[in-house]
């Protein structure tokens, strides 16, 4: 991916599998979010190919519009700076995520306008799905409050629940633990592990919080200056000299405060 | 010790008014007033004779104006210092009124509809009152239509009057050239206006906010200028007259009908009165407006309505959830335009005569003002604002040339006390559980 003369992501290739948590880490400006934006259609990659295998069918993402990627390839994402529908209630946020399903059930609003049973049952099912994820993220009590008034951590969880309500095959989370306190990020870990265990979904994760990354990832991909410098299990990546160099610099490992070094190791 | 003395200083500044600052402020206001008053009231031209103009100066009037502004500004400032609580009391009353009207929404709606339905038969009602109520209802309907575009989808449209005009001209032309009646032309007007809405929608898909407003403003002007200059079809500035009146299931409202046609009063055995038609037209617009309201309320609770609101909140997130923003925007423009088209069709049949003069920018501005003053997305607010904005100039008739001044002042006052509109309140489109059963 190039922006003018700047190559933000160069010659990167990796796989993310269903029922696995794949983390992308790297220092600031390494190109992690750019990878996400290419994947979800917000950017068109200058060169290269993104393929999504859904039900034995291979979809070429780089040729699709952003909303089609979400709709047909089943890629849902969250954002680094939370993007909820702040003026709508928590439940409405989750119902909007099921828009395409409900829209076809309402036959482009005609069945919905007359309240036909076909639409009413679809709406009930959508509310049930929303309730399921509300229970999972612990927001059932707040279902009818305005999303923008929720505390920060709850907004993060709601955004994940909203992405899951869209029924994705691949869930892309852009720094889900940013701004969470240690207890909240432990809850996030548990939530992501539960999703992996219960759903036929792959999770792709950008994260700086090493407790989250090392604790739950099946595979870690490390980017630096837009290039992949490591790819493997948490243990392998932790020991990789290239990774240590990228994060800590060449000679400064010894002079680091102990807590930071243990966080990384 | 220091804390205590600090508090004492704080107290003293609250108690004593900084007269120097107040006076300075009032003097500045008076100077501005002098600057404005000099050319406006200070100089008068008069005919010297022989076609030449002389200039008379009225510095006394300038002095009066400056003194009035000085005193007024000073009084306002003092009032603000001493009666700060008094001002917030008005805001508090208004917000309590809003909360009350939200709690009583259903009862208020029923009462309002019942009152509207009974209005023509009330003892104090007159032809003038029903006419005024009809005008109010046209604006209510236009407000509800524009609410779809501005209030729900968040697309600022300054050219809404274009669709109103398209609807009106669709009916006028189809009546003149195809001989369609009002009821036949009504769906056609909506359809044509909706297509214009979608046509406008395409070029502005990528625009938002101020830029969108400018393009829609231009679109409104284009429609008006085309109507004005395409004389062979639209009659240009002369407009189209003799537009047929609506009939009651085929029964016309007339003193005498041509051979073979029964009129309304003959059929029901009433004495003929021109008020019957006025009353009937009033009921037509009441029905149209109520249908518009039910239609938009229903749409709000459907996926399409939620997608509109989601688009208003965050377009990027919509895209990431697989919602096609193009379709959502076009549907909002189309449906908003359709409702405007219906209103336009009614306007044409009510007036019996239309010309481009009825569709100037000031109409768009009034409709938008109704939506914004009422509270974006609030159906009740639109009604309240429409009543206010239509009847206020009427009451102002007694003050003749001060009408617009009073009108403007009222709008400023509303925006100062209720910056989010008279009845700003959003009802969730669906709830997880009724609040009463959640505890069990």
Image (tube, rainbow, N blue to C red):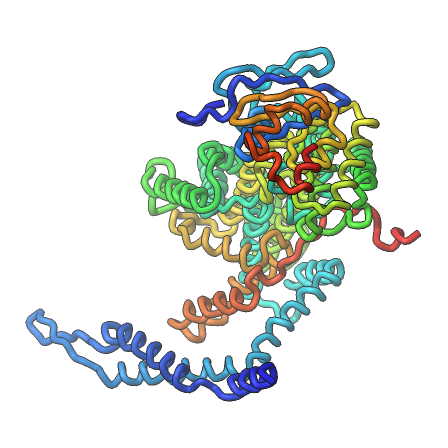
Q: Considering the image in quadrants, where does the C terminus of chain A appear? A: top right
Q: Position of residue A2 (x, y in %)?
A: 46, 24
- Asked which quadrant contains residue B98, the reply is bottom right
B259 or B341: nearer the eye? B341
Q: Residue B178, percent across and down? A: 48, 33
- Percent x, y of residue A105: 74, 29
Quadrant in the rendering for residue A74: top right
Q: Can you give x and y, in whole percent of width and height, for residue B246 in the image?
A: 56, 46
Q: Give whichever of A123, B234 is nearer the camera.
A: A123
The picture quadrant where one finds residue A237 is top right
Residue farthest toward the front in the current orientation of the protein: A254
Residue furthest to the right: B440
Q: Farthest residue in the left direction?
A: B50
> From the viewer's perspective, is residue B190 above or below residue B61?
above
> Residue A120, can we see it?
no
Q: Is residue B137 left or right of residue A76?
A: left
- Which residue is depicted at the point 61% across and 51% down? B377
Depicted A54 relative to depicted B65: above or below:
above
| A68 or B223, nearer to the observer | A68
Residue found at x 70% / y 25%: A22
Residue A33 visible somewhere in the drawing? yes
* Residue drawn at the location 66% of the way across and 21% of the way down: A73
- In this rendering, the count of numbered labels is 0
In this rendering, the answer to whether B266 lies above or below B51 is above
Direction from residue B29 to residue A101 in the image, left or right: right
């Amino acid at each position: 991916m190039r922006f003018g003369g700047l190559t933000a992501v160069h010659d990167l290739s990796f796989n993310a599998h269903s029922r696995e948590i794949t983390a992308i880490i790297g220092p600031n400006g390494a190109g992690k979010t750019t990878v996400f934006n290419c994947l979800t259609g917000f950017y068109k990659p200058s060169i290269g190919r993104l393929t999504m295998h859904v039900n034995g069918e291979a979809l070429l993402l780089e040729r699709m519009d952003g909303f089609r990627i979400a709709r047909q390839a089943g890629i849902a994402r969250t954002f680094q700076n939370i993007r909820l529908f702040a003026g709508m209630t928590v439940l409405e946020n989750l119902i909007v995520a099921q828009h395409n399903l409900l829209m076809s059930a309402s036959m482009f609003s005609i069945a919905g306008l007359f309240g036909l049973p076909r639409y009413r049952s679809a709406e009930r099912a959508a509310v049930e799905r929303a309730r399921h994820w509300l229970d999972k993220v612990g927001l059932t009590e707040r279902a009818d409050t305005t999303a923008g008034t929720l505390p920060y951590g709850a907004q993060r969880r709601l955004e994940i629940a909203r992405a899951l309500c869209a029924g994705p095959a691949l869930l892309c989370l852009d720094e889900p633990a940013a701004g969470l306190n240690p207890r909240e990020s432990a809850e996030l870990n548990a939530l992501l592990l539960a999703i992996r265990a219960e759903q036929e979904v792959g999770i792709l994760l950008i994260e700086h919080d090493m407790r989250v990354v090392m604790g739950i990832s099946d595979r870690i991909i490390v980017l630096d200056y837009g290039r992949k410098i490591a790819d493997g299990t948490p243990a392998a990546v932790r020991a990789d000299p290239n990774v240590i160099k990228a994060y800590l610099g060449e000679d400064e490992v010894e002079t680091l405060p102990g807590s930071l070094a243990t966080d990384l190791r | 010790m220091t804390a205590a003395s600090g508090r004492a200083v704080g107290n003293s500044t609250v108690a004593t008014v900084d007269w120097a600052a107040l006076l300075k402020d009032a003097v500045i206001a008076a100077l501005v007033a002098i600057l404005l008053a000099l050319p406006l009231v200070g100089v008068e031209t008069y005919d010297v004779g022989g076609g030449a103009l002389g200039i008379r100066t009225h510095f006394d009037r300038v002095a009066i104006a400056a003194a009035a502004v000085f005193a007024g500004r000073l009084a306002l400032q003092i009032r603000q210092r001493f009666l700060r609580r008094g001002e917030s009391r008005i805001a508090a009353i208004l917000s309590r009124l809003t909360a009350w009207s939200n709690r009583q929404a259903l009862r208020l709606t029923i009462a309002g509809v019942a009152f509207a339905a009974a209005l023509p038969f009330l003892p104090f009602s007159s032809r003038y009152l029903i006419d005024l109520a009809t005008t109010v209802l046209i604006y209510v309907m236009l407000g509800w239509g524009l609410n779809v575009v501005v209030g729900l989808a968040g697309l600022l449209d300054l050219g809404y009057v274009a669709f109103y005009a398209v609807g009106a001209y669709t009916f006028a032309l189809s009546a003149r050239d195809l001989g369609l009646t009002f009821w036949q032309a009504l769906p056609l007007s909506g359809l044509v206006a909706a297509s214009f809405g979608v046509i406008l929608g395409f070029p502005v898909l990528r625009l938002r906010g101020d830029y969108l407003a400018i393009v829609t403003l231009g679109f409104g002007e284009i429609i008006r200028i085309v109507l004005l200059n395409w004389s062979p079809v639209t009659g240009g500035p002369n407009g189209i007259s003799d537009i047929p009146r609506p009939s009651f299931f085929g029964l016309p409202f007339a003193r005498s009908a041509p051979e073979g046609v029964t009129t309304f009063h003959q059929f029901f055995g009433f004495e003929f009165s021109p008020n019957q038609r006025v009353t009937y037209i009033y009921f037509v617009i009441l029905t149209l407006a109520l249908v518009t309201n039910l239609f938009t309320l229903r749409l709000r609770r459907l996926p399409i309505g939620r997608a509109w609101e989601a688009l208003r909140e965050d377009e990027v997130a919509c895209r990431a959830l697989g919602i096609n923003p193009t379709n959502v925007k076009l549907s909002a423009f189309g449906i908003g335009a359709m409702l405007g088209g219906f209103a336009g069709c009614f306007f044409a049949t009510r007036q019996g005569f239309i010309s481009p003069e009825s569709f100037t920018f000031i109409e768009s501005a009034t409709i938008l003002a109704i939506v914004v003053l009422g509270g974006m997305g609030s159906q009740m607010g639109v009604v309240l604002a429409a009543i206010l904005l239509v009847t206020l100039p009427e009451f102002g008739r007694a003050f003749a040339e001060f009408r617009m001044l009073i009108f403007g002042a009222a709008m400023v006052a509303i925006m100062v006390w209720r910056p989010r509109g008279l009845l700003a309140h959003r009802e969730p489109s669906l709830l997880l559980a009724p609040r009463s059963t959640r505890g069990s």
